[in-house]
Image (cartoon, rainbow, N blue to C red):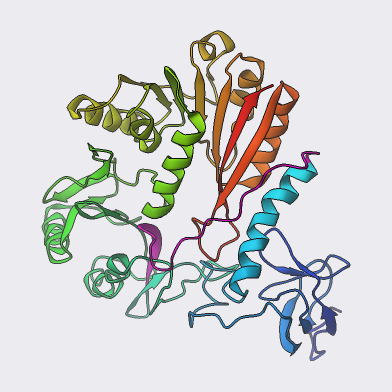
Amino acid sequence: MTPGSAGIPPALTDVDIVRIGHKGDGETADGMYVPFTVPGDRVRVEGEGDHAKPVELLSPGPSRASPPCRHFGICGGCVLQHVEQIAYREWKREQVMLALAQRGIVDIDIAPLIPVAPRTRRRAVLTGRFVHDEIMIGFQERGTHFICNMVECHVLHPDLFALVEPLRKHLVGILPEHGRAEIDITRTDSGLDMTLGLPRVEIDGALRTRLADFAAKLNLVRLTVNNELVAQSRPPVIRWFGAEVTPPPGSFLQAVPEAEATLQELVVANVGKTKRVADLFCGAGAFTFALAKQTAVAAYDSETDAVAALTLAARNAQGFKPITAERRDLFRRPLLEHELNAFDAVVIDPPRSGAKTQTEHLAKSKVRRLVMVSCNPATFARDARILIDGGYALTRVTPIDQFLWSAHIELVALFERK
């Protein structure tokens, strides 16, 4: 018979938190994870094994702070609002250090974390659901598929959050009972761009007219529904160093413009003066155009629409060195050593899974300088180990807090041939 069944109360235990684990949960000395706790907390918890639920805070640790958002602890968007700012920033920096140490990479120059301000995120994917005559909109609750019906958010830019209440109103009659909507919103330099995923909803003529009216009332520059363009008042535009790029619907962009500007500055500074650079996993060109102000760039990415957007913007832009862009799946068909050796430097910004195969070819190349951008310290450390074993030295790492109050960390690293 398990605790909590047949009237038996669940087991309660008092534990001491000694550290914060890599996913943001507090951890005891014997490896039990307790969410929303900090080092020095003494907590009464429910459950056994590796994970437990906090029931009562018996005494707080010195780095505990009051979360600013009323949804904290329910909404799955943030996990670290309860940590005092200095301790929070040092924890994020330490995650990079620990990930590298697990691969035997130590004594590396890791800069202090570069912060971002609250309410600056320009892109988010929210979920909407129609339940009991009510449209609920927000991020998913922690560990469930339920929706935290948000009434505030300290991460989203106010222009994005301002859409939440109108969306609740306008999705009535569009979503069927228990129907869900994936709401991808981007604040571009020319206005708000929205991509809606509406499973089980057929877009007929009448609904198309209603959705176009919906886009006009929300002042959207573009509305795409179920991968179909429904309305566009003007092109959504991202401006990079004088180039105007219209990103494809739902396209990847750095989450915070200020963090993106910092990344661009670091990438360009680390590349230094070179004649020709390869930009791998280039997306729509955030680093391509930054680099092309001073050097020729060959850009590669697997996303056809992103490469097309980059190519069109480069064709129409002035004041840049030569830019070429090619669609290429760098997982299945990475650049080989002889191709890489044509470049003085390489910039690589892979997804969270990293780029193990491409990194293996880089490690065998003669490229003198490599700048890696990563949003996952674990896969970054794995790929860094490959490069170091291939003769590179990891010169410096700069972490950036692009994903505020989450356990995610962005970073820029410079590798140089010994």
Q: Position of residue 304 (x, y in %)?
A: 35, 29
Residue drawn at 47 percent across, 24 percent down: 329
Is residue 383 visible from the viewing direction of this image? no
Magenta-colored stretch includes residue 231: no
Q: Is residue 413 left or right of residue 283?
A: right
Q: Quadrant of the N terminus?
A: bottom right
Q: Nearer the viewer, residue 89 or 26?
A: 89
In this rendering, the answer to whether 38 lies above or below 244 is below
Quarter where residue 133 is shown? bottom left
Residue drawn at 12 percent across, 61 percent down: 216
Residue drawn at 29 percent across, 49 percent down: 226
Q: Quadrant of the C terminus?
A: top right
Is residue 182 visible from the viewing direction of this image? yes
Q: Position of residue 350 (x, y in %)?
A: 53, 36
Q: Is residue 344 left or right of residue 25?
A: left
Magenta-colored stretch includes residue 122: yes
Residue drawn at 55 percent across, 26 percent down: 331
From the image, give the main secondary structure of the stretch colored magenta: loop
Q: Nearer the viewer, residue 416 or 36?
A: 416
Q: Position of residue 318 (x, y in %)?
A: 19, 28
Query: For the view shown, which residue lies furthest in the front direction?
Result: 273
The magenta stretch is: 103-129
